[in-house]
Image (cartoon, rainbow, N blue to C red):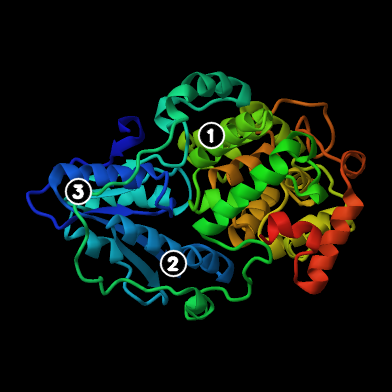
Amino acid sequence: MQERVRQLNQAPLPASGRYVLYWAQMNRRVEANHGLAYACQISREVGLPVLFYEGLTCAYPHANDRFHTFVLEGVPETARRLAKLGIGYVFHLRRRRNDPDNALYELARDAAAVVADDYPAFVARRYNARVPVKLGIPYFVVDSSCIVPMNRIDKREYAAYTIRPKIHKLLPKYLQPAPQPKPGRRFDEPVSPLHTPVREADIPALAASCEIDHSIAPSTAFRGGRLEAERRLEHFLNANLRRYASARNEPSAHATSNLSPYLHFGHISSLEVALEAREYAQEHKLIADEFLEELIVRRELAFNFARYSEDTETLDALPDWALRTLRKHDGDRREPCYTAEQLEQAATHDALWNATQKELLLRGKIHGYYRMYWGKKIIEWSATHQDAIRFMIAMHDRYALDGRDPNTYTNILWCFGLHDRPWGERPIFGQIRYMSLDGMKRKTGVDAYVREIAELERTGREAQAAQGELAL
């Protein structure tokens, strides 16, 4: 456990305190949560209960109905599971921008220590940089996102081939079930006035009451929460793991796990998914190597990049060869050249690209293989490379349930050469890898995908063929 833990201030444990506070910034779950388990470990050492704090503010970037609804859908089950363990729960919904923004500090006043998530991107990175020095109690962060703790890889890796042997060497030690949360005492204090009770029937009204962007509707395909994450994992194992290697790059086959929104919001952990996939593959004599490569090596390469990069949202994070070739070709003529508004509205000449953008607008996620094509074409059709990356990030920030994540920033920058190698020289791209519509037509069922998204746009409902994976 200690290899996952960092203390971010120098404060000692106080002589008094009513509980140990776990702040679920990113890992909004009870099971396989090393941060919660560590809070429980401290609570046993000092003989105190544990309070689980989860906040949802109206003020995070691009706050909207889609993200709010997805988070709110997870709250009732979290409350039920924490109650069974005797762990207190405060879910605080900050609805208006002029409402107090001090729930964490109010709860920390009565805490012996704060334990938070060690997460190298989005708001957690910023909070962990500025909050600890304001507290007079210990502030710990715990890596509950990666299977091999980020601390064990001590520098930024160049590509998958450099991090893979390091990950595989350490996996036997860390690919083990996480410790169960066992608090030192049962939490029996009155419900905090900061707590917002959430019933499933009240979720639309709660989202509507918040000062957020109401123009972006909840996903047509994804419902948030632990139970949905568990169901999707079970379905993937039973229906798709055996065909993942052969069909994962065929979007119309719906052979992927579609767990990325649940991994991002912490409703399930990569550790749980990996253990379940390994066990299922062994029991049914399947090979899960391709899936585990994506889940572990590729995902943890992204966390490694975010951990050791000052800024994950800039072209300056690219390797030198990529920066040189992009600078050389940034002034190349673009034909066609679309505005950000045209791209956001999926108003290009390319039916496949338009479908990928519409999938993002409606579902809040683009199939991984087509997301590569989506990004490459944005580079080709934007006035500058800087305009291209700015647009890609903005679209994920605003619409993607798996956005604002180390994987998001890594996948976007991959389009510009991150974790890749030089290819043949060509206009606009220089030596950056290029992807063509003809290539997509040769390798995938473009027409079937375009028809599926068109029907989704027309009806607002997922087609029967997609329901097993997308509307479970």
Residue 295 lies in quadrant: top right
Q: Position of residue 253 (x, y in %)?
A: 80, 48
Circle 3 crowding by C-alpha within 10 Å: few under 14, some 14–19, many from 20 = many
Instruction: Specify the label residue 58 is tagged with.
Output: none
**Secondary element type, mark 3:** loop
**Does residue 143 appear anywhere in the picture?**
yes
CB contact under 8 Å: marks 3 and 1: no
Q: Position of residue 75 (x, y in %)?
A: 44, 65
* Relative vertical location of residue 300 with respect to residue 360 in this rendering, above or below: above
Front-most of residues 352 and 71:
71
Kindly identify the residue that appears in the image at 85 percent across and 65 percent down. 454
Q: Which quarter shows the C terminus?
A: bottom right
Image: 109 above or below 275: below
Image coords of residue 18 (percent x, y) = 15, 58
* Secondary structure type for disc 2: helix
Left or right placement of residue 398 versus residue 50 in this view: right
Q: Distance from label 1 to label 2 (Cα)?
A: 30 Å
Disc 3 vs disc 2: Cβ atoms closer than 8 Å?
A: no
Residue type at tag 2: Pro
The residue that disc 1 covers is 300
Mark 1 or 2 closer to N-term?
A: 2
Image quarter where the N terminus lies is top left
Q: Which residue has dot 3 on it?
A: 184
3 is higher (above) or lower (below) than 460: above
Q: Which residue type does callout 3 highlight?
A: Gly
Residue of label 2: 76
Amino acid residing under circle 1 = Glu
**Residue at x-position 63% and y-position 71%:** 216
